[in-house]
Image (tube, grey):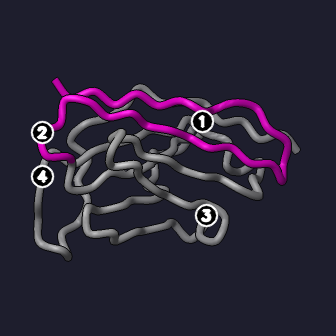
């Protein structure tokens, strides 16, 4: 079975940094694309960033220049380095993975599997 386990959330002051991790297991051949999403209270879940096997990245406008997505393929772990955090970044952050092992380079990133989420709270 595929499992995604997030860690690294916590409470930080505005301007601080956190690094989220998502350990993936159960994939044979690795996921085509993995992504980070977040959901703040009373709001819809939104895509924050994604990374494909060929290195294509996406960042939401609200985090571009502050967040960096990366992956350790040997450990099958996805990371999200979050710098210059703002109170509006407060949310539960979820890791997601595409079930496909390969796809056309321009393919969008699907979310077939989800982690349980990790809370990020940024105080002002």
Mark nearer the N terminus (4 vs 1): 1
Quadrant containing the N terminus is top left
* Mark 4 or mark 3, whichever is nearer to me: 4
- Residue at image location 29% in from the left, 62% down from the top: 52
44 or 11, which is in the foreground?
11
Magenta-colored stretch includes residue 7: yes
Mark 2 sits on what residue? 28
Mark 3 sits on what residue? 63
108 or 44, which is in the foreground?
108
- Distance, label 2 to label 4, CA atoms, is 8 Å
Q: Position of residue 3 (x, y in %)?
A: 28, 27
Please tell me the numbered disc located at residue 101: 4
- Residue at image location 50% in from the left, 38% down from the top: 21
| Range of residues picked out in magenta | 1-30
Residue 16 placement, left or right of 109: right
- Distance, label 4 to label 3, CA atoms, is 27 Å
* Mark 2 or mark 4, whichever is nearer to me: 2
Q: Secondary structure at mark 1?
A: loop
- Distance, label 2 to label 1, CA atoms, is 35 Å
Q: Position of residue 10 (x, y in %)?
A: 69, 30
Callout 1 crowding tier (Cα within 10 Å): few <14, some 14–19, many ≥20: few
Magenta-colored stretch includes residue 21: yes
Mark 1 sits on what residue? 41
Mark nearer the N terminus (3 vs 2): 2
Establish if 50 lies above or below 123.
below
**Pointer 2 and pointer 4: residues touching (CB < 8 Å)?**
yes
Establish if 13 lies above or below 8.
below
């Amino acid at each position: 079975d595929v499992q995604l386990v997030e860690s690294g959330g916590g409470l930080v002051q505005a301007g601080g940094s956190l690094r989220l991790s998502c350990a993936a297991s159960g994939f044979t051949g690795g996921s085509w694309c993995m992504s980070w999403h977040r959901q703040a209270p009373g709001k819809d879940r939104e895509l924050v960033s994604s990374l494909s096997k060929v290195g294509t990245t996406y960042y939401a406008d609200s985090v571009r220049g502050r967040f960096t997505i990366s992956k350790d393929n040997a450990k099958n772990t996805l990371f999200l380095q979050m710098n210059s955090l703002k109170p509006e970044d407060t949310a539960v952050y979820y890791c997601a993975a595409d079930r496909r092992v390969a796809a056309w380079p321009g393919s969008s990133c699907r979310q077939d599997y989800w982690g349980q989420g990790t809370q990020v709270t940024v105080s002002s």
